[in-house]
Image (spheres, rainbow, N blue to C red):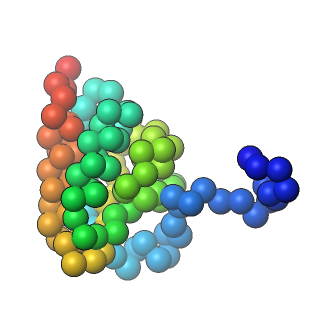
Amino acid sequence: MPRGVSTSSWRPSCSTTREADSALPGRSVTIVNARGLHARAAAKFTALAEEFDAGVTVSNGRETVGGRSIMGLLMLAAAEGTEISIRADGQDADAALAALCDLVEAGFGEDKE
């Protein structure tokens, strides 16, 4: 934390409020790969999210983060079996949702061990 920054009002930039997020179109999917949403899987997710003209958020039911933030996705601590909600808005929202949900449902291209 930089000096002079109050920790009482600090919030990670990748967070969004649940109220604002719940109005966006979205889908729930379950993490199926054995390692969960780890660094390599998060990198694949963010790279795919970047391909679309859409804002993407991901929630584990407790926390909502930006879908283009590897660190945010890692903060969800989404292990195998965790249900996440992916929401999107913007010109490519439907295509982004479909592609990102397909990626998660395919286990991020990893073996399901």
Please state which of residues 3 and 17 is positioned toward the viewer in this rendering.
3
Answer left or right for 69 relative to 45.
Answer: right
Rendered image quadrant of residue 39: top left
| Location of the C terminus (image quadrant) | top left
Q: How many marks?
A: 0
Residue 97: x percent and y percent? 21, 63
Above/below status of 31 relative to 65: above
Answer left or right for 18 relative to 96.
Answer: right
Q: Residue at x 48, y 44 (%)?
A: 71
Above/below status of 19 relative to 81: below
* Residue 36 visible in image: no
Residue 75: x percent and y percent? 50, 44
Above/below status of 87 relative to 41: below
Please state which of residues 1 and 95 is positioned toward the viewer in this rendering.
1
Above/below status of 112 relative to 79: above
* Residue 82 visible in image: yes
Rendered image quadrant of residue 66: bottom left
Q: Residue at x 37, y 56 (%)?
A: 67
Q: Residue at x 15, y 56 (%)?
A: 99
Residue 27: x percent and y percent? 25, 63
Outermost residue on the front side: it is 3
Q: Residue at x 45, y 41 (%)?
A: 74
Rendered image quadrant of residue 104: top left
